[in-house]
Image (cartoon, rainbow, N blue to C red):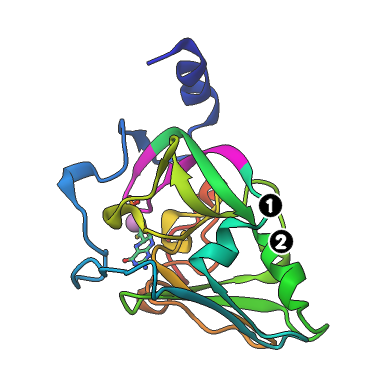
């Protein structure tokens, strides 16, 4: 553990969290919803961006890898109480994807659908914050099957159930579609800094 990471630990751990060294604690490498890890063939994989947009877009893996990319280091907090600090993500800013599809003015929410049947949603304006990205690399390597390959969302200030893995569709809409864990008792706002874990 480097000095830099230790510094991040003492300064920036949200309430009720403790640190673990890496993702996949407990050797868990399956979706949290109890289905097998989706096996995705990159040649057949597509990302659909649709809903209330001016321009519906379908991106292949090749299209995606040509988009401007960014790197972002952030901490990852699961609602069950474990956090991994200083993860180095690389991918595409959510804003870059939004600009391709041009959401209509009425589009206030975004739903992420995933190859394992999972879904989650967020207000569009929260996805335009710093550090929110669609990641395809973690700590310098392409994502593995168990961490959401080929593409996952990363939303640093929200509990990790907002960080959808194995994304296949990004849908813009005027109405909120409540996600998988959010409809099973977990907070829809999911703010790690206010211990915002459960819905009221
Ligand atoms: N598609 C999909 N994304 C998901 C989940 C899931 O079951 N399916 N679980 C969420 C939860 S609760 C957590 S803690 C993280 C786990 O990410 P990791 O496996 O990389 O640690 O993914 C989130 N994204
Ligand atoms: Mo989680």
Q: Magenta stretch mostly in which secondary structure? A: strand
Q: Residue 109: name its quadrant.
A: bottom right
Q: Are marks 1 and 2 in contact (CB under 8 Å)?
A: yes
Q: What percent of the width, then of the height, locates residue 70? A: 64, 44
The vertical placement of 11 against 107, above or below, is above
Q: Residue 177: name its quadrant.
A: bottom right
Q: What percent of the width, then of the height, locates residue 158? A: 53, 54
The residue at the far top in this view is: 3
What residue is drawn where x is 38% and y is 72%?
181
Mark 1 Cα shell of 10 Å, populated few (<14), some (14-19), many (≥20): few
Q: Taking the image as four quarters, which one is ligand 2 found in? A: bottom left
What residue is drawn where x is 38% and y is 50%?
143
Count of labels in the image: 2
Upstream in sequence: badge 1 or badge 2: 1
Q: Which residues are magenta?
A: 71-83
Q: Secondary structure at mark 2?
A: helix
Q: Secondary structure at mark 1?
A: loop
Residue 60 as seen in the image, left or right of residue 97: left
Q: Identify the residue position indicated by label 2 in the image.
A: 96
Examine the structure image and report whether residue 74 is included in the region drawn in magenta: yes
The vertical placement of 27 against 56, above or below, is above
The image's mark for residue 68 is 1
Q: What percent of the width, then of the height, locates residue 199? A: 46, 70
Q: Please state, as top left, top right, bottom left or bottom right, where the N terminus lies in the image.
A: top left
Q: Which mark is in front, 1 or 2?
A: 1
Residue 96 visible in rendering: yes
């Amino acid at each position: 553990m480097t000095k830099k990471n230790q510094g991040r630990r003492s300064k920036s751990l949200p309430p009720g969290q403790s640190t673990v060294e890496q993702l996949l604690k407990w050797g868990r490498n399956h979706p949290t919803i109890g289905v097998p890890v989706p096996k995705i063939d990159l040649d057949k994989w597509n990302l659909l961006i649709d809903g209330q947009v001016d321009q519906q877009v379908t991106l292949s893996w090749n299209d995606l890898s040509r988009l401007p990319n960014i790197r972002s280091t952030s901490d990852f907090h699961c609602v069950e109480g474990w956090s991994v600090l200083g993860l180095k993500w690389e991918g595409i800013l959510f804003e870059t994807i939004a600009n391709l599809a041009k959401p209509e003015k009425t589009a206030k929410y975004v739903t992420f659908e995933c190859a394992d049947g999972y879904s989650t949603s967020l207000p569009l304006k929260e996805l335009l914050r710093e550090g929110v990205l669609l990641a395809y690399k973690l700590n310098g390597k392409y994502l593995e099957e168990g961490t959401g390959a080929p593409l996952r969302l990363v939303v640093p200030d929200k509990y990790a159930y907002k960080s959808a893995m194995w994304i296949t569709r990004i849908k813009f809409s005027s109405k909120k579609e409540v996600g998988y864990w959010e409809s099973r008792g977990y907070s829809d706002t999911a703010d790690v800094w206010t211990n915002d874990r459960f819905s009221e």
